[in-house]
Image (cartoon, rainbow, N blue to C red):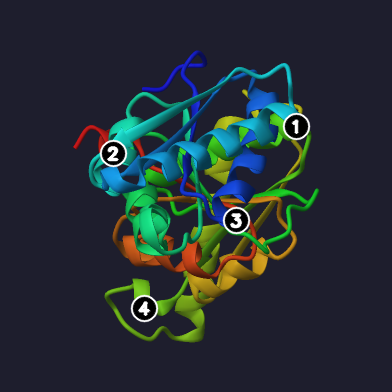
Amino acid sequence: MTTPDQPIVVGIDGSEDAVHAANWAVAEADHRGAALLLVIVNDDPARASHAESAVHKAAAKCRAMAPHLAVDVEIAQGRPVEELLRHSRKAQLMVLGGRGHGGFADALLGGVSSAVATHGSCPVVVVRRGVPTTVGPVAVGVDGSESSSAALRFAFEEARRAGAELLVREVWHEGDLLAGPLSPDERDRVQRDVEQSLAEQVSALHEQFPDVRTRQLAQRGHPVAALTDVGRDAQLLVVGHRGRGGFDGVFLGSVADGVLHHAPCPIAVVRSSDDTAT
């Protein structure tokens, strides 16, 4: 379990993507009243001075953006995924760039960011350079699973901090159902079931977040395509790491991974407490 006094950890690698992610993290830290910890993972002693220069340069930019924030740096030794996952255990949030570049910056190549996002002990946000940060709603995909419930709570918290509307979407398609293609009547029945599930999930948290405006949409379609479309106008898209079977099985790892690769906004991947304990 993360606590408010834990830092927001930012993975730094000297790339523009990592700098863009750090900029996003500064605004998030300001909203949360949290400290920033910038971490660079260097596995080659010959690049030590380069790594030190990169992380301190990024820290200077963060301090210039928000002089009141506490910003620390750390140069870690080891394998990028292992080190970033280790740091996720002491963070309230981890922020990564979507892609790095050659040399020691391989630490944040897309595969590493994806691995950390889907296995981190805390929520992980992936921010790609060139993806605009909007003032639109916070969006979240749900499916009734434990990870989905954790993602929905995280999304409510983010929307409240940002003073933003929360768009909650549940997507289903026949591929999630063991019965195969459905008749029109069966599709109508499943649609009603999904709409009821969605309403119940949102209602369960509305009393705790009465000031958050919400919109709900249940639809039949492809989960990755539908959530990517939602992300076009969102300031943040939140997904759970793992779903469950039946029509609720929309957040199996492949869907979260697909959203990470295609959504046109920052992506937050949230794991349930049961997931992080394993």
Amino acid type indicated by mark 4: Gly
Residue tagged 1: 65
Marks 2 and 4 sit apart, C-alpha to C-alpha, by 37 Å
Q: Are marks 2 and 3 in contact (CB under 8 Å)?
A: no
Amino acid type indicated by mark 1: Met
Q: Is residue 207 visible?
A: no
Amino acid type indicated by mark 3: Glu
Marks 2 and 3 sit apart, C-alpha to C-alpha, by 21 Å
Quarter occupied by residue 147:
top left
- Residue 202: mark: none
Query: Is label 2 or label 3 in front?
Result: 3
Q: Relative to the observer, which residue lies in front, 169 or 139?
A: 139
First-in-chain label (2 vs 4) = 2
Q: Relative to the observer, which residue lies in front, 157 or 130?
A: 130
Side of 249 relative to 20 (left or right): left
- Residue 83: mark: 2
> Is 190 situated above or below 64?
below
Q: Are marks 4 and 3 in contact (CB under 8 Å)?
A: no
Marks 4 and 3 sit apart, C-alpha to C-alpha, by 39 Å
> Is 260 situated above or below 82?
below
Secondary structure state at the residue bearing disc 2: helix
Residue tagged 4: 175
Marks 1 and 4 sit apart, C-alpha to C-alpha, by 47 Å
Residue beneath the point at 35% across and 54% down: 243
Residue 81 in the image: state x and y as whole percent: 29, 48
Residue tagged 3: 16
Marks 2 and 1 sit apart, C-alpha to C-alpha, by 27 Å
Amino acid type indicated by mark 2: Glu
